[in-house]
Amino acid sequence: MEFCDECGSMMKAEEELWVCGSCGSKKPKDPDASYVVTEDQEVSEIIESGDGENSPLPTTDAFCPECGNDRARWYMQQIRAADESETRFFICTECSHKWREDDN
């Protein structure tokens, strides 16, 4: 794993370079080092076991923008930089509509 000297973000491997996805700076890879390159991790939905009433997710008061229901299941996931807060995801208990809430 390489981090950008300019902004501190994690860099991505491209050919013979490390490229920062945030500021665009580049630096060459060390030709003597060995690297393990994996597929990009996709932002994924939480894996739920059970459905409806049997869901292990907690519920809270939240207004569904789709149907107007006032209860939703929720979970948090880190999808941005590690120094930023998590994103809250909600799933309506009535219509199963999914939406997210960021601290912007």
Image (spheres, grey):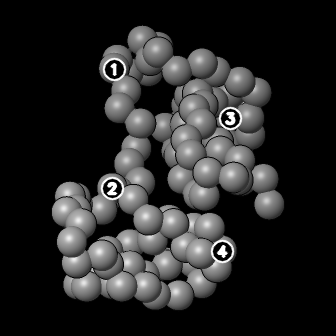
The Cα atoms of the two marked residues, 3 and 1, are separated by 23 Å
Residue closest to the far front: 32
- Which of discs 3 and 1 lies nearer the camera? The answer is 1
> 2 above or below 53?
below
Q: Quadrant of the N terminus?
A: bottom left
Q: Which residue is mark 4?
A: 7
The residue nearer to you, when weighing 51 against 45, is 45
Image coordinates of residue 92 in percent, x first then y, are: 58, 35
Say which element carries label 2.
loop
Of the numbered discs 1 and 2, the one sitting upstream in the chain is 2
The residue nearer to you, when weighing 52 against 43, is 43
Q: In which quadrant of the rendered view does residue 22 lie? A: bottom right
Of the numbered discs 4 and 1, the one sitting upstream in the chain is 4
Say which element carries label 1.
loop
Crowding at label 3, few (<14), some or many (≥20) Cα neighbours within 10 Å? some
Of the numbered discs 2 and 3, the one sitting upstream in the chain is 2
Crowding at label 1, few (<14), some or many (≥20) Cα neighbours within 10 Å? few
> 19 above or below 83?
below
> 16 above or below 73?
below
Residue closest to the far top: 54
User: Which disc number belongs to residue 41?
Assistant: 2
Say which element carries label 4.
loop
Q: Which residue is mark 3?
A: 69
Crowding at label 4, few (<14), some or many (≥20) Cα neighbours within 10 Å? few
The Cα atoms of the two marked residues, 2 and 4, are separated by 22 Å
Q: Which residue is mark 1?
A: 49
Of the numbered discs 3 and 1, the one sitting upstream in the chain is 1
